[in-house]
Amino acid sequence: MPRRLRLCPAGISQHIVQRGNNRQVCFSCDEDVAAYANWLHEGARKYEVLIHAWVFMSNHVHLLVTPQVDLASSLMMQYIGRHYVRYFNHKYHRTGTLWEGRYHSNLVQQECYLLACQRYIEMNPVRAKMVTDPADYKWSSYRCNGLGVKTKLLTPHPVYLNLGSTKASRLLNYRGSFCSAIDQELLPDIRYSLNKALVLGTQQFKTEIEVLTGRRVRPARRKRKSA
């Protein structure tokens, strides 16, 4: 039976996670991260995907993207996978798979949820106790979104741009949002919707996605057992 196509409608942002097989290391040095980032940029440009946030950890990747055409982010991830696995296997004299099956992804409603998801991604190194300040981790988008470092990889989301009328005010307001923790009730929702390939958003937004795609995006209700 063919695998079910991912939910990947144009114009709807997605949170994507790609993990190393059995949590194995997929980036052994800065050169590896730079190679992956290069193919991410090429794939995004080739398939019309906007990249809003990222973090490259030693054994997994988080991305926040918006495809401009249907299925674009899925095609982008296939493109990256082909090129990076070939590069990694050749460099380290290995064969076989590198990634843990298919990547995980879910749709994200931009109102209320997108910036929280973006913060969740950029705070990954802090949660992993690798750094105490997200600005100290160079392989994430925080330095771009929070400090104004320029990169060809980033396209700011309109929700981010609405944080201020000037670049300086946006940077200030974005950094300020990291002074408080993400709502503890939201964290499980971010993780659950990602792992189950569901939707992070309001019930109304979920209904709109179900109408748009013809797919259920909420967990099915459990049937009660008969007495």
Image (tube, grey):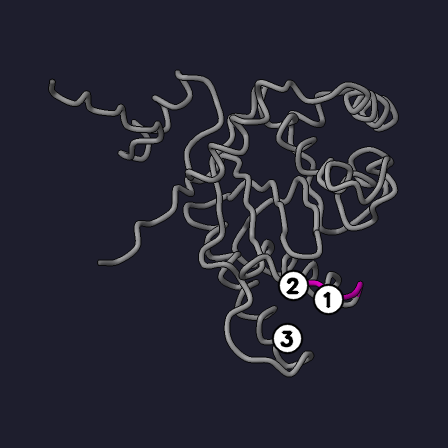
Which quadrant, please, contains the N terminus? bottom left
Check disc 3 and give the amino acid type. Answer: Tyr
Please rate how many residues cluster around mark 1, counting C-alpha atoms within 10 Å: few if below 14, some from 14 to 19, many from 20: some
**What distance separates the C-alpha of mark 3 from that of mark 1?**
9 Å
Relative image position of residue 137 (x, y in whole percent): 83, 45
Relative image position of residue 54 (x, y in whole percent): 68, 45
Residue 87's disc number: 3
Viewer-proximal residue among 219 and 162: 219
**Residue 165 visible:** no
State the SS at label 3: helix
Residue 32's disc number: 1
Check disc 1 and give the amino acid type. Answer: Asp
Kindly identify the residue that appears in the image at 88 percent across and 42 percent down: 136
Viewer-proximal residue among 93 and 144: 93
Kindly identify the residue that appears in the image at 83 percent across and 49 percent down: 138
Q: Residues in magenta? A: 25-30
Give the number of the mark in front: 3 or 2: 2
Q: Earlier in the sequence, mark 2 or mark 1?
A: 2
Relative image position of residue 132 (x, y in whole percent): 85, 36
Q: Is residue 104 magenta?
A: no
Residue 33's image quarter?
bottom right
Residue 70's image quarter?
top left
Q: Is residue 195 above or below residue 169?
A: below
Q: Which residue is mark 2?
A: 26
**Residue 97 visible:** yes
Q: Do callouts 2 and 1 mark residues in contact (Cβ within 8 Å)? A: yes
Viewer-proximal residue among 215 and 100: 100
Kindly identify the residue that appears in the image at 78 percent across and 67 percent down: 31
Is residue 189 rendered to the left or right of residue 134?
Answer: left
Is residue 57 rendered to the left or right of residue 224?
Answer: right
State the SS at label 1: helix
**What distance separates the C-alpha of mark 2 from that of mark 1?**
8 Å
